Image: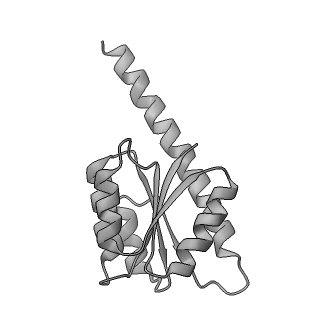
């Protein structure tokens, strides 16, 4: 069972994402603001496998601040940024900062929560491969 944190200041979004990811068998916790999300990330041991964060909460860079905290806490935590205010510059900045992916909430005719579930699955696979690679390196350097 993988550990996932969903951070969004819209309670309805948190609840829908939580239910969707729990259907896939994940242990999902939620936070309703940037500060609560950062506190949860710092307190979680073992760390979250994936953090799904809204981009704009208290300020326009809330998602980037969450991303930076998550990666500083554990480099193997994968971050998916979810936003209603998508733009190319924002997406590029998130990806350069280490996000696994960047998903827009408001895509007409598309079930964004299914896309998000797919992105989380892909992020978990990348995390699994990264951790396995590190373990192999450690075995060969002993």
| Rendered image quadrant of residue 56 | bottom left
Total residue callouts: 0
Looking at the picture, how far across and down is residue 20, in whole percent?
Answer: 66, 64
Front residue (pair 59, 88): 59
Quarter the N terminus occupies: top right
Looking at the picture, how far across and down is residue 33, in whole percent?
Answer: 36, 75
For this view, does 71 lie left or right of residue 31?
A: left
| Rendered image quadrant of residue 7 | bottom left
For this view, does 23 lie left or right of residue 36?
A: right
Q: Residue at x 53, y 57 (%)?
A: 28
Quarter the C terminus occupies: top left
For this view, does 129 lie left or right of residue 111?
A: left
Front residue (pair 34, 87): 34
Residue 104 can be seen, yes or no: no
Instruction: Name the residue at the top extreme.
Output: 142
Question: Does 135 appear above or below 44?
Answer: above
Please name the colour scheme applied to the rendered image: one colour
Question: Does 139 appear above or below 22?
Answer: above
Q: Residue at x 65, y 71 (%)?
A: 113
Q: Residue at x 30, y 63 (%)?
A: 38
Looking at the picture, how far across and down is residue 69, in whole percent?
Answer: 27, 59
Question: Does 28 appear above or below 64?
Answer: above
Instruction: Name the residue at the right extreme.
Output: 109
Residue 135 can be seen, yes or no: yes
Looking at the picture, how far across and down is residue 78, in whole percent?
Answer: 44, 53
Q: Residue at x 63, y 83 (%)?
A: 107
């Amino acid at each position: 069972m993988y550990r996932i944190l969903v951070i969004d200041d819209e309670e309805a979004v948190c609840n829908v994402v939580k239910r969707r990811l729990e259907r896939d068998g994940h242990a999902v916790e939620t936070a309703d603001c940037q500060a609560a999300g950062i506190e949860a990330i710092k307190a979680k041991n073992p760390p979250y496998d994936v953090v799904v964060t809204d981009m704009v909460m208290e300020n326009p860079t809330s998602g980037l601040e969450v991303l930076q905290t998550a990666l500083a806490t554990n480099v193997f935590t994968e971050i998916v940024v979810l936003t209603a205010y998508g733009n190319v510059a924002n997406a590029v900045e998130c990806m350069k900062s280490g996000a696994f992916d960047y998903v827009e909430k408001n895509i007409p005719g598309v079930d964004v929560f299914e896309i998000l579930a797919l992105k989380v699955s892909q992020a978990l696979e990348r995390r699994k491969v990264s951790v396995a690679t590190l373990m192999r390196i450690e075995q060969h350097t002993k």
